[in-house]
């Protein structure tokens, strides 16, 4: 019976594959295939729900294939079906169905009709994977899918500047959550000594753990919490949500109004066994929820555009859900999720109506608001809150100032080092490192201790150079490859491991980077400017190259389409539990290469395509 | 040489800026106008190519697109020859044709706009727009917001800059980061000049700098300029000037630069070594422009010729004398009524239809029952002196809780998620599978209660309400009725029931709904005006006065107001109870005819909607058309004025059976009763601005949907109830959305007027405003002389025009419509195929 969970993926996957074969004009088949897959899933879910309810409401675990196995690491695909995931999946499938039907007409004759439906299906697969994931590794696959489809959907109008800018901004932040989740996987591996599934941890006491340290027990849920906060736009990560309202109203309605933004709540419930028993943890979750609710409600009150208003109201409600979760009222939170996601989706769908409705209402019932007083101390407090709310409590600037600016500054600090000089130094060192990996027995003891860190630092310098590189995309791409090669050296030096693992890792990297090089060279041959100073928007003229390049980028970023994805996880497993500095450096490295890759794609292919022979929007539009 | 400005004149610059900014009002008052009104003092092509060079607008298709149109036969070779001969002479045909077809030209994007502000990024490495605009737009949107925010920007009656000052003064937080900016903000009589001295430093660059700055967000600057000029375009009054906006923006720029560079940085002017062109100095008209002009003219004349050929054919043919009409109906000149009138005439050949601007001479303000404001219901250019009040209603509008601001509060929002939220799922299904009229759908018939009462007759001319006379006096009524009837030539044979048919449009989820309503009623449904007119024409005292002026309306004749919903294809009638028994019976017969005509009209419209199969049962089609107008998921409830291209001023009898595919504005006029053209002068007066405005807005939105149009409406975000933006910190989008213009062939309006060339020359030369429309080529003018010959107005004279396209005839027009091609994509190459060529329907 367990196997039936798997059937939920067949429809959407098939629909996705078939979807690629249509051309954009074939609206009806595109719609039908998508719709049928949603309906099938709805039926399957109904059967599963029936089964679940009448078979003792036992959670079901499906152990999938083990993709990789070594002595202390294992990467397997597990699925878990329980009440929470069933209900969430039900709501998700219902909403997807509604949106598919709505979009059929709404997106009629849109340039990206097919693209939209493909992303929708891909997103749905992602969300199902998260909901039904039986272990963190599987959850991470869904997580990555959602991140990437979000990037595409926010940047759906890829020829305008603002959608692309915001998509990039949001995906950069998502990268923080990705890495948090990766760290959670690492921590869990070391804490429990093997890949654990969510079902076993519901009884944490019974699992033996290797690294017997309180730090680990706290760090694991903390990583989950950070990931959840980012995805659910909780304080201090709230400002991305209103900026995500860039795509067609229907996509905003389902993703940023409901499904995507509530995932954090689900993650918290799913990982509750990790943190329930830690005394302060529920307080932390509750405090974050409360702070978010207060700030977001206040910001929502001053929003003068309908979609951002809905976004902030939604965030405020999710803050309350965090409080509910903190109190242990999981089912209340789930109910609250259902109400909020349906309400906000619907409000977004009908948001264009607000103009004529409210103007009409005003025509008959307008009362000018009272005059703001200024004498009293409380008036001044009130006005201060007003100013802060308009400025979104500086949350957007905060991210800019504290997350990206330091990295930029750090990168600029190495500007004395020209790329050429760096290559002259870095490449020999690389081969030296490679030689050492094979001849580890010759290394003195301090070598194994400090060399990995040393190499990671060089690794970081390389990626920072790539991050601030503005002139040539070819250089940036090359640095990226070099960075990945360096990473393997780090792992090689750090631990005794079978070289097959590096092969797994490198296989995807090498292929992807070669494809990337090919695309860049082709563009150059066509006489195109490939600097990274501005957005070029080449997707307008070269949609196919853009598609190829995006696939290469995803491969390089460790997206679950190449074995690199598994390699990433496996290699990370080779960092020992007592190597925190190394881990942190590696984490920064991973965040950065995600940023560099997405930015490279955006700068090259997205944004305004400035030309006199077709129309394009002004930057501020 | 234009003189360079050495002294900074704030007033002059602000006026100049305003002139070039979009003049679109808030969306509730959507009125079509020429998007390039600022260039209308120039000849058409000179004007549009200037706009292209200065602002980077796309004003024609690309050469490649024209060439493909030629290859697919949309532009015929004979037309190309004719166009070249006309402007270059016959000996040049070969040379120019070679260039048109194979010439290579530089198509890079290189506008003058932005020449100065780009240095911020180039020299200072600062993306100033990114640092300033989000906060600036937020402040502006909050300040102007009409009712989305729950918490309003305070001190809105003090002016933008003062309000910001007061907030700053009374708060512990600040919008600014730099001390210098705050200090400057609080300076009394702060001038633009001192801010520009800090930022730019060179007086001769100030104007261009401000143009760069304001035009990067032309939507916001435009709306500020409009509100400054006309406070009534918003209900919740806000004091604002463009000057304040500029100062605030300059302050924010100083703030951003200070916080990035410290408070000592050299002004921008010190880095500019190249000579910056005066943006508005004359634009060289190169060969590329010449070729594009020829192509565009060929594109236009290819269609015009087809039309003119059929028109000449019909005007040369003897038509049957008209019988006593079974019914008469006056419609708006609107191009969307063109097909309904044709279908009515097809069903009942004795049914006479007439066209006049849809406010029917009644320039009024309208106050619905319980309304706190007035609606302007007449062309924008007029300022009404009369107020019509609704004094009794039968139905009250319902509330829609989903839009309630409670849902955005914290605790009440929580309750809403558990109550409204759970319902939302059901409502989604209802809206998808059984769309019905809801309170938040704009309903054309809700503008005025169907069974309400109006106060039309003025009781006391001296008792004014806000300077307006409430209702009309009998004398005023008679004047209005007389001039309208005279204008449309309805002076002798009257049917027993005469309909006055206004139009409006219902649509769901559509911030641009005003663009679908009656343009002659300032973008509102025109039912009020129709009712007012019918009341006047039925008034016994008015009839007497009319008789005195020579128009004898038989006693049994009754006027009845109606309104056609152009989206749902429904007609409703007003004040039917006033009909005599006999007339009521006739009316019932008319309703049958009208319903049949509406069925056919729905079918004709349906052919352009991909989701409706035109071959199915006609009642089903009608139902689907109706559903479109109440479906939230339908971004095209109707296609508005898309494809409009023609305006015919003349008698209907002659042109009956001419199939123009809903592309013509039809104004009735009878030249035989007006030999000197005095009436014609009156009739023509409003048409260039109304029809030309619509036509040019469609033209420019189609040519550049991103810079002059509003782009696709799918991501639009309603902002402040005044407009739409993309994204959370985007500029207001002006112009028409993609979904309205995608089937439009951008050709200028061809106005055809029946009379002699001499009379028409007299009329157009008597008003320079009107003359310029034709002389500068923003509208084409062709005279249809009484003998059936055509004269084209070209370079100040009327030149005989002999069309050469063969006339297409058919005896089954419905079949022609049914077999029309449906476009594959909305690119012009496909979209233009959807138009059905002009046919003459043999009777």
Image: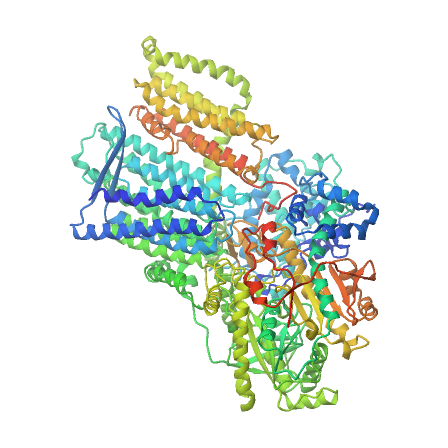
Is residue A478 rendered to the left or right of residue B195? left
Q: How is the image coloured?
A: rainbow
Front-most of residues B718 and B269: B718
Is residue B729 rendered to the left or right of residue B410? right
Front-most of residues A182 and B519: B519
Across the whole image, how many numbered discs are drawn on residues?
0
Vertical comparison of B254 with A87: above or below:
above
Front-most of residues B111 and A509: A509
Vertical comparison of B648 with B164: above or below:
below
In this orientation, does residue A442 appear? yes
Vertical comparison of A303 with B621: above or below:
above
Percent position (x, y) of residue B105?
Answer: 71, 39
Percent position (x, y) of residue B29?
Answer: 59, 65
Percent position (x, y) of residue A189?
Answer: 26, 30
Front-most of residues A456 and B488: B488
Rendered-image quadrant of the N terminus of chain A: top left
Q: Quadrant of residue B685?
A: bottom right
Is residue A469 rendered to the left or right of residue B197? left
Percent position (x, y) of residue B320?
Answer: 69, 78
In this orientation, does residue A282 appear? no
Vertical comparison of B813 with A289: above or below:
below
Q: Quadrant of residue B793?
A: bottom right
The furthest residue to the top: A442
Q: Quadrant of residue A556?
A: top left
């Amino acid at each position: 019976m367990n196997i039936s969970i798997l059937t939920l993926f067949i429809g959407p996957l098939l629909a996705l594959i078939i979807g690629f074969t249509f051309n954009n004009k074939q609206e009806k088949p595109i719609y039908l295939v998508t719709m049928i897959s949603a309906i099938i899933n709805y039926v399957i879910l109904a059967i599963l729900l029936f089964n679940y309810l009448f078979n003792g409401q036992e959670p079901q675990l499906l152990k999938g294939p083990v993709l990789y196995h070594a002595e202390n690491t294992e990467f397997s695909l597990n699925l878990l079906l329980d009440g929470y995931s069933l209900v969430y999946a039900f709501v998700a499938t219902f909403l997807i169905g509604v949106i598919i039907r709505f979009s059929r007409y709404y997106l009629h004759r849109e340039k990206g009709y097919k693209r939209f439906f493909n992303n929708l299906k891909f997103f749905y697969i992602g969300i199902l994977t998260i909901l039904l994931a039986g272990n963190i590794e599987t959850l991470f696959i869904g997580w990555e899918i959602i991140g990437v489809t979000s990037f595409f959907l926010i940047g759906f109008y890829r020829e305008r500047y603002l959608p692309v800018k915001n998509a990039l901004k949001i995906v950069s932040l998502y990268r923080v959550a990705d890495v948090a989740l990766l760290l959670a996987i690492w921590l869990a591996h070391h804490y429990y000594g093997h890949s654990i599934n969510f079902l076993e941890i519901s009884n944490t006491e019974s699992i033996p753990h290797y690294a017997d340290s309180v730090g680990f027990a706290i760090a694991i849920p903390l990583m989950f919490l950070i990931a959840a906060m980012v995805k659910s736009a909780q304080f201090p990560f709230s400002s991305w949500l209103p900026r995500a309202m860039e795509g067609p109203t229907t996509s905003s309605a389902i993703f940023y109004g409901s499904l995507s933004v509530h995932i954090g709540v689900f993650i918290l419930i799913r990982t509750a066994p990790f943190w329930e028993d830690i005394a302060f943890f529920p307080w932390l979750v509750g405090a974050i929820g409360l702070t978010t609710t207060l700030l977001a409600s206040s910001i929502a009150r001053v929003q003068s555009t309908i979609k951002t208003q809905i976004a902030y109201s939604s965030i405020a409600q999710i803050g309350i859900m965090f409080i509910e979760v903190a109190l242990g009222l999981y089912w209340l939170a789930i109910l609250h999720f259902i109400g909020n996601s349906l309400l906000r989706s619907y409000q977004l769908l009908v948001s264009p109506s607000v103009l004529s409705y409210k103007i009409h209402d005003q025509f008959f019932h307008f009362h000018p608001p009272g005059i703001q007083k200024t004498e009293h101390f409380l008036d001044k407090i009130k006005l201060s809150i007003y100013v802060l709310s308009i400025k979104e409590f500086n949350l957007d600037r905060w991210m800019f100032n504290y997350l990206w600016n330091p990295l930029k500054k750090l990168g600029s600090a190495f500007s004395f080092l020209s790329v050429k000089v760096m290559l002259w130094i870095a490449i020999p060192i690389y081969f030296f490192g490679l030689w050492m990996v094979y001849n580890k027995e010759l290394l003195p003891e301090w070598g194994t201790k400090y060399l990995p860190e040393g190499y990671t630092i060089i690794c970081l310098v390389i990626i920072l150079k790539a991050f601030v590189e503005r002139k040539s995309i070819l250089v940036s791409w090359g640095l990226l490859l070099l960075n990945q090669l360096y990473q393997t050296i780090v792992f090689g030096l750090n631990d005794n491991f079978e070289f097959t693992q590096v092969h797994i890792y490198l296989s995807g990297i090498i292929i992807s980077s070669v494809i990337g090089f090919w695309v860049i060279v082709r563009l150059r041959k066509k006489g195109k400017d490939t600097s990274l100073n501005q957005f070029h928007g080449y997707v307008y003229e070269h949609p196919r190259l853009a598609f190829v390049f995006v696939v290469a980028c995803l491969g390089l970023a460790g997206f679950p389409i190449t074995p690199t994805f598994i390699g990433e996880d496996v290699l990370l497993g080779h960092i020992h539990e007592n190597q925190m500095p190394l881990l942190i450096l590696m984490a920064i490295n991973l965040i950065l290469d995600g940023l560099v890759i997405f930015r490279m794609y955006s700068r090259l292919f997205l944004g305004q395509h400035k030309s006199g022979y077709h129309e394009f929007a002004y930057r501020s539009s | 040489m234009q003189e360079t400005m050495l002294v900074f004149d704030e007033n002059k610059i602000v006026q100049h800026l305003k002139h070039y900014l979009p003049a679109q009002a808030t969306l509730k008052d959507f009125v079509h106008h020429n998007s390039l009104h600022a260039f209308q003092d120039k000849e058409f092509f000179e004007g549009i190519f200037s706009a292209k060079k200065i602002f980077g607008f796309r004003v024609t298709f690309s050469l490649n697109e024209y060439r493909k149109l030629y290859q697919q036969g949309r532009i015929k070779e004979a037309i190309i020859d004719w166009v070249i001969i006309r402007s270059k002479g016959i000996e040049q045909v070969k040379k120019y044709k070679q260039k048109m077809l194979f010439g290579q030209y530089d198509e890079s994007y290189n506008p003058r706009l932005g020449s100065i502000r780009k240095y911020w990024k180039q020299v200072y490495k600062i993306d100033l727009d990114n640092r300033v605009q989000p906060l600036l737009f937020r402040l502006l949107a909050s300040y102007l917001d009409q009712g989305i925010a729950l918490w309003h920007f305070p001190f809105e009656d003090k002016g933008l800059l003062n309000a910001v000052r007061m907030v700053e003064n009374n708060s512990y937080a600040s919008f600014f980061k730099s001390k210098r900016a705050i200090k400057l903000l609080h300076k009394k009589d702060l001038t633009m000049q001192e801010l520009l001295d800090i930022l730019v430093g060179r007086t001769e660059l100030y104007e261009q700098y401000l143009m760069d700055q304001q035009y990067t967000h032309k939507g916001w600057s435009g709306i500020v300029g409009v509100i400054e000029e006309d406070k009534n375009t918003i209900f919740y009054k806000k004091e604002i000037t463009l000057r304040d906006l500029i100062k605030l923006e300059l302050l924010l720029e100083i703030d951003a630069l200070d916080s990035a560079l410290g408070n000592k940085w050299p002004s921008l002017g010190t880095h500019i070594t190249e000579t910056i062109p005066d943006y508005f100095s004359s634009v060289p008209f190169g060969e590329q422009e010449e070729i594009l002009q020829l192509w565009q003219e060929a594109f236009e004349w290819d269609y015009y010729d087809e039309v003119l050929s059929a028109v000449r054919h019909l005007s040369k043919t003897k038509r049957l004398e008209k019988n006593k009409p079974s019914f008469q109906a006056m419609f708006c000149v609107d191009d969307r009524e063109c097909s309904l009138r044709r279908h009515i005439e097809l069903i009942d050949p004795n049914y006479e239809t007439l066209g006049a601007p849809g406010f029917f001479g009644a320039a009024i303000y309208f106050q619905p029952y319980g309304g706190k404001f007035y609606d302007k219901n007449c062309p924008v250019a007029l300022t009404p002196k009369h107020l019509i009040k609704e004094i009794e209603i039968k139905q009250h509008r319902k509330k829609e809780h989903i839009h309630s601001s409670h849902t955005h509060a914290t605790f009440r929002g929580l309750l809403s998620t558990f109550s409204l939220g759970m319902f939302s799922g059901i409502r989604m299904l209802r809206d998808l599978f059984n769309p019905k009229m809801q309170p938040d759908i704009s309903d054309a018939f809700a503008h005025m209660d169907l069974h309400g009462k109006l106060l039309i007759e003025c009781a006391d001319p001296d008792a004014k309400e806000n300077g307006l006379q409430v209702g009309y006096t009998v004398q005023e009524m008679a004047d209005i009725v007389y001039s309208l009837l005279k204008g449309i030539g309805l002076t002798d044979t009257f049917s027993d029931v005469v309909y006055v048919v206004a139009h409006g449009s219902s649509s769901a989820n559509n911030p641009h709904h005003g663009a679908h309503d009656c343009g002659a009623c300032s973008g509102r449904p025109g039912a009020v005006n129709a009712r007012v007119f019918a009341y006047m024409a039925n008034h016994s005292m008015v009839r007497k006065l009319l008789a005195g002026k020579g128009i004898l309306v038989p006693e049994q004749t009754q006027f009845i107001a109606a309104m056609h919903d152009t989206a749902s294809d429904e007609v409703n009638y007003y004040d039917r109870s006033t009909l005599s028994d006999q007339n009521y019976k006739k009316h019932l017969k008319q309703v049958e005819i009208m319903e049949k005509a509406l069925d056919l009209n729905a079918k004709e419209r349906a052919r352009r909607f991909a989701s409706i199969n035109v071959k199915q049962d006609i009642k089903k089609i009608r139902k689907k058309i109706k559903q479109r107008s109440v479906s939230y998921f339908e971004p095209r409830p109707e296609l508005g004025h898309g494809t409009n291209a023609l305006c015919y001023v003349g008698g209907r009898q002659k042109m009956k059976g001419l199939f123009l595919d809903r592309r013509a504005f039809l104004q009735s006029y009878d030249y035989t009763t007006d030999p000197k053209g005095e009436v014609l002068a009156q009739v023509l007066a409003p048409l260039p601005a109304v029809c030309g405005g619509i036509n040019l807005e469609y033209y420019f939105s189609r040519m550049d949907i991103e810079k002059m149009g509003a782009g696709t409406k799918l991501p639009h975000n309603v902002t402040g109830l005044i407009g739409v933006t993309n994204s959370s910190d985007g500029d207001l989008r002006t112009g028409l959305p993609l979904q309205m213009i995608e089937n439009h062939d951008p050709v200028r309006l061809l106005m055809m007027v029946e009379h002699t060339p001499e009379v028409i020359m007299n009329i157009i030369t008597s008003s320079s405003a009107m003359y310029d429309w034709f002389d500068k080529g923003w509208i084409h003018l062709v005279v249809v002389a009484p003998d059936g010959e055509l004269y084209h107005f070209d370079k100040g004279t009327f030149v005989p025009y002999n069309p050469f396209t063969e006339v297409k005839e058919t005896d089954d027009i419905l079949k022609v419509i049914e077999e029309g091609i449906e476009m594959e994509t909305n690119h012009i190459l496909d979209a233009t195929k959807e138009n059905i060529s002009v046919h003459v329907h043999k009777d």
